[in-house]
């Protein structure tokens, strides 16, 4: 096996490992619990914005 073949083999293995790690991270972030948490955070921020607009810029508790 010459140097070029060895380099290509090592590069392919490294890229496969990186791809696998990225897949696991994406799978974790796409979990139903995480999606619900993000939805709640966005809904809370949106409701704060609407309250500020209705109150004329004053924060209403």
Image (cartoon, rainbow, N blue to C red):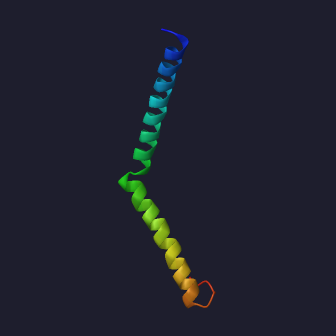
**Who's the residue at 42% across and 40% down the image?**
23
Viewer-proximal residue among 56 and 12: 12
**Who's the residue at 55% across and 12% down the image?**
3
**Who's the residue at 40% across and 51% down the image?**
30
The spot of residue 4 in percent (x, y) is 53, 16
Spot the residue most to the left.
Answer: 32
The spot of residue 41 in percent (x, y) is 49, 66
From this view, report whether residue 16 is shown above or below residue 40: above
From this view, report whether residue 31 is shown above or below residue 38: above
On-image quarter of the C terminus: bottom right
Compared across the picture, whether 34 is left or right of 57 comes to left
**Who's the residue at 50% across and 26% down the image?**
14
Compared across the picture, whether 28 is left or right of 51 comes to left
Viewer-proximal residue among 44 and 60: 44
User: Based on the displayed image, in which of its 4 quarters is residue 54 positioned?
Assistant: bottom right
Spot the residue most to the right.
Answer: 58
Compared across the picture, whether 55 is left or right of 16 comes to right
From this view, report whether residue 52 is shown above or below residue 3: below
The spot of residue 51 in percent (x, y) is 54, 84
């Amino acid at each position: 096996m010459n140097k070029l073949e060895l380099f290509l083999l090592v590069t392919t293995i490294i890229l496969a490992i990186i791809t696998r790690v990225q897949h696991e991270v994406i799978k974790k972030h796409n979990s139903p619990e995480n999606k619900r948490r993000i939805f709640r955070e966005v809904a809370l921020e949106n409701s704060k914005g609407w309250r500020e607009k209705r109150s004329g810029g004053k924060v209403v508790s």
